[in-house]
Amino acid sequence: MSEEEFGVESEQLSIARKFGLRVMEVPTTIRYEGLENTSKKDPVSHGLELIMVAHKLLVQDKPLLMIGLPGLLFIVTSLFSGYLFVRDYQLTNYFSVPMALITFTFLTLGTLLILCSLIFYALYLLKLEIKKLRIET
């Protein structure tokens, strides 16, 4: 377990799912009598922490989907904006600096995201191989 505070619960559920365990919710009633403030965190920071933990767990398990797919979408967007940039230049002989910057930015971000997803995927495969070797020995 690597998470602390409220993120532990999400990580526990993720680990249980990996081992094929089923989780069942059981209704409970809790009363905090005599306490004014029963929560350590406000709802916004608690919610953001849970979203960040869930995103981290998804990226660790599916880097190509969670990082590579947005990278591919950035590259497709850059190709479309590049097409518009070239078309406008051919029609008007006006070099649009903002459109060129948008195209370059989307292309750069897309390329970096795809490269990062490939690196994370290689690390994920390495982690699986190490676990496999530990089980065999």
Image (cartoon, grey):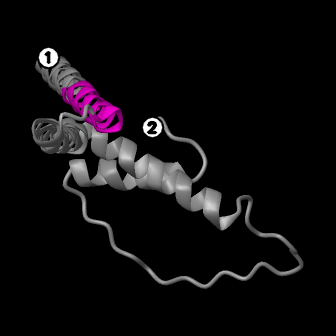
Q: Which mark is residue 1?
A: 2
Which residues are drawn in magenta?
A: 96-114
Separation of residues labelled 1 and 2 (CA atoms): 21 Å
Q: Main secondary structure of the magenta part?
A: helix
Mark 1 touches mark 2? (CB < 8 Å): no
**Which sits in the foreground, 80 or 16?**
80
Q: Which mark is residue 133?
A: 1
- Type of amino acid at the residue the image marks with label 2: Met
Q: Earlier in the sequence, mark 1 or mark 2?
A: 2
- Type of amino acid at the residue the image marks with label 1: Leu
Q: Secondary structure at mark 1?
A: helix
The residue carrying pointer 2 sits among few (fewer than 14), some (14 to 19) or many (20 or more) residues within 10 Å by Cα, namely: few
Query: Which residue is at a point 39% across and 76% down the rendered structure image?
Result: 25
Q: Position of residue 31 (x, y in %)?
A: 73, 82
**Which sits in the foreground, 43 or 27?**
43
**Which sits in the foreground, 84 or 112?**
84
- Left or right, 53 with respect to 110, comes to right
Quadrant containing the C terminus in the rendered view: top left
Q: Position of residue 103 (x, y in %)?
A: 24, 34
Q: Which mark is residue 123?
A: none
- Asked if residue 105 is among those painted magenta in the image, a careful observer would answer yes
Q: Position of residue 8 (x, y in %)?
A: 50, 49
Above/below status of 91 relative to 136 = below
- Asked if residue 126 is among those painted magenta in the image, a careful observer would answer no
Q: Secondary structure at mark 2?
A: loop
Query: Which residue is at a point 51% across and 50% down the rendered structure image?
Result: 7
Above/below status of 101 relative to 62 = above
Query: Which residue is at a point 22% across and 40% down the rendered structure image?
Result: 74
Query: Which residue is at a point 15% across and 44% down the rendered structure image?
Result: 84
